[in-house]
Amino acid sequence: MPVFQNLSNALVLASTYILMAAGLSMVYGVLKILHVAHAAVYTVGAFTGLVMYTWVANFWLALFGAMVVSGVMGVLIYRGVYFYMLDAPRTVPLIASIGMFVMFTDLLQKKFLMGPYQKALPVEGAGMPALNVGVVSITSTQMLILVVTVALMLGVYLILSRTRIGLGWQAAAMDREMAGAVGVNLNRVVALNFFLGSALAGAAGVLVGAYNNSVFATMGDIVSYKAFIIIVLGGMGSLPGVIVASILLAVVENFLVASVGYVLPRDAVAFLVLILMLMFRPHGLFGRE
Amino acid sequence: MSGYVISVAIFVGIWVTLALSLNILTGYAGQVSLGHAAFFGIGAYTSAVLAVRYGQPFWVDFIAAIIITGVVGTILGLPSLRVRHDFLVLATMGINFVVVAIFKYVDFFGGAMGLVNIPAPSFFGATFRGGTPYLILVWGYVVFVWAVSWYISKSWVGLAFNAIRLDEDAAAAVGIGAARFKIYAFGISAALAGGAGSLYAHFIGSVFPDTFVFVESIAILSMVVFGGMGTLRGPIVGAIILKAAPEFLRFVQDYRFTIYGALLVLMMLFQPMGLLGDDSWLWQLLKRWFGKKTVAPSEEVAQ
């Protein structure tokens, strides 16, 4: 039955979408900023993972390093740019974000960083077992992606629901000003927000790089547009919404391509969905007016 | 003037009209668009298809490009009725991708190979490609677009755009139909960009989908933001500087998008109104140096 195989492939795709979109959704939830530069964070994560992997040849160290670098980059983006724009009209941080995205993507393409070519990231599952149960076979790399995603999302859930600063984050996501008024340290909460979200994006970059065995400077573009579609579908700023929407998008994409092929490229179809979505259900599939 | 300088001046002129037309939508009406290159492309492809497939002369192509792009822009502006602020930005980004994908994957538009052999315009039997007459044509269009922008900024429509940009709900509360004026802004802005596309297609002689991609939209937006959104002078100066600089400075050519991106960030951090916006230090300085002469009343209204 190819149905189950498609489903498991879709789940792997959905995992990478979740890691990518979670950060975007978190930033939107707290700051109401469309963080376009998140795509650059994702690419920087993949690039760091690649560099570390060629140095130490240990996937887990590379993943960890990539997450730290991306996380720090996210915090720097917040502290260096968005921080000064919190009270400005919403177009101001948005345009700045677009600027950062274009700047980082262009810089990464230069020879002294990544160059314009694709580079291999031959991780091969990093010691994860492959699974083969009759109808479904999961390669070791796929297994790696699933395990890492579940572990990371569980970690984020624990941080946000069981720690003091996590509770502060929840309060800030509901109402930033009110949270500040009752004594939540907004600077720390927002910094944590950017660190976690960006670290997840970095992990996504490394995992996608490992899955496709290729890392390149513009790899963030399409994923980030899809992440926007996901946060719109999932209702902006909701993490459970992100998970459901990621799975939905991945399943639809996989089955469409498997059954009818496509007339327009996948991404154009995804964007058509986005435009229709925005026109008819601007608050997301599950959002309320 | 050498041929090279004339070509650069023609390109700069085309991009000045693009920046001015985006300014009507983004600067006046406050709707940030990341899809302006799509309208530029629609104009160029309308012209190219009419010229190559149907053998129409330049003037027919040019007028048709303006009209058709305006109509398409009006239709594509419809999401703006439901979607506000940053969601609209996502929609315009999507529009850009879908339009480019259509150019690329539909054979009628020549696919990835584009459309070539677009004939040069002819005036009373004399055909020419480029050269001083084309330069005059392009800058004539610049004056036209400038005049439209100026008229809008002075008119009732411009006031309505201002109101929508500052506070849509308040505008609606005092009886300004925000929906209607947003659609106007999309339509006018797209139509003017369509004219620029037509001029571009007939100048280059060929159109390719990759010319009209998302990053080009960003480049146009950079010009508007850098110069000063919502003013008449800003987009003109921004487009001239950002379009001409890569031609003359090797470094700028190599790092074009790094510089565009950095400019967007720096402007937003330090001069959100742009280089020549009303609050910018440069404009204040000019005002102090040259007194009232530099501040035409029209500019103040345009803001």
Image (cartoon, coloured by chain):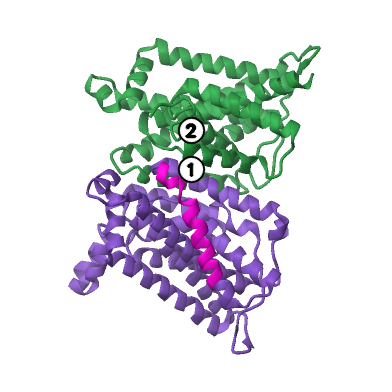
Chain colours: A green, B purple
Instruction: Tell me residue A198's x, y (percent).
Output: 49, 29
User: Compared to A97, does B43 lie above or below?
Assistant: below
User: Compared to B18, does A198 lie above or below?
Assistant: above
The residue to which callout 1 is attached is B90
The chain that hosts pointer 1 is B
Instruction: Label the magenta part by its dominant secondary structure.
Output: helix
> Residue drawn at (68%, 53%), measured in percent from left and top?
B104
Q: Which mark is residue A199?
A: none
Under circle 2, the secondary element is helix
B106 and B251: which one is in front?
Answer: B106
Under circle 1, the secondary element is helix
Instruction: Tell me residue A252's x, y (percent).
Output: 64, 29
A146 and A206: which one is in front?
Answer: A146
> Residue drawn at (60%, 47%), measured in percent from left and top?
A109
Number of residues whose C-alpha sits closer than 10 Å to that of mark 1, classed few (under 14), some (14–19) or many (20 or more): many
Instruction: Tell me residue B64's x, y (percent).
Output: 55, 69
Q: Which part of the image, by quadrant, shows the N terminus of chain A? A: top right
C-alpha separation, residue under disc 1 versus residue under disc 2: 10 Å
The residue to which callout 2 is attached is A232
Discs 1, 2 touching: Cβ within 8 Å:
yes
For the magenta stretch, what is the residue range?
B63-82
A125 and B173: which one is in front?
Answer: B173
